[in-house]
Image (cartoon, rainbow, N blue to C red):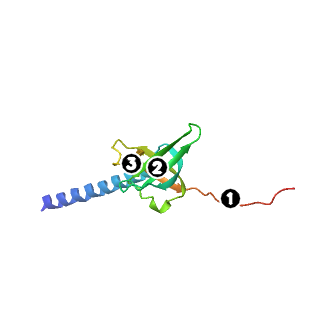
Amino acid sequence: MKAMFFTLFLFVCVSGFAQQNTDSIKKAADNRPGPSAIGTVVHVDNKNCPVAIRVIRPERKDTLYYIPMGTDIDSLMGKRITFRFGRLMIKQPLGCNGIVARVWDVKKVNTSHKKGKKSK
């Protein structure tokens, strides 16, 4: 009988510790550091990579395409966004040209400008 209570006690303790551990990992993943960029979500005419993020870098006079993995950004099609990213060391999907990346902290950029009164 003592063995059964001891086993039950250990099970409860271990399951509580595991729950606390996964919560702290999730919070840490949301606040993780990484380079940030501003780009536009664009449609790519390829069934293997229908969405990409186009980042124009005028200082280097080039354009990068990030292929987001693990993030659903289809609802932001055509919008400018800011995002953090980390490059993934996996092969590009067949027919996709770009940098395969995990994308997080995605925020829409407000591009509307309020017209103010002109000063005389």
**Dot 3: within a 10 Å radius of its alpha carbon, few (fewer than 14), some, or many (20 or more) residues?**
many
Give the alpha-carbon distance from disc 1 to disc 2, as whole Å.
30 Å
Q: Is residue 47 left or right of residue 64?
A: left
Which mark is drawn over residue 113?
1
Question: Which residue is tagged 2?
Answer: 31
Circle 1 sits in a helix, a strand or a loop, which is it? loop
Question: Mark 1 near mark 2, Cβ–Cβ under 8 Å?
Answer: no
User: Would you identify the image quadrant in which residue 87 lies?
Assistant: top left
Residue 73 versus residue 94: which sits nearer the camera? Answer: 94
- Report, in whole angstroms, how far the alpha carbon at label 2 lies from the one at label 3: 29 Å
Residue at 48% x, 53% y: name it.
105
Q: In the picture provided, is 67 more to the left or to the right than 82?
A: left
To which quarter of the image does residue 22 belong? bottom left
Disc 3 is placed on an element classified as: loop
Q: Nearer the viewer, mark 1 or mark 2?
A: 1
Picture disc at residue 96: 3
1 relative to 14 in the view: left or right: left
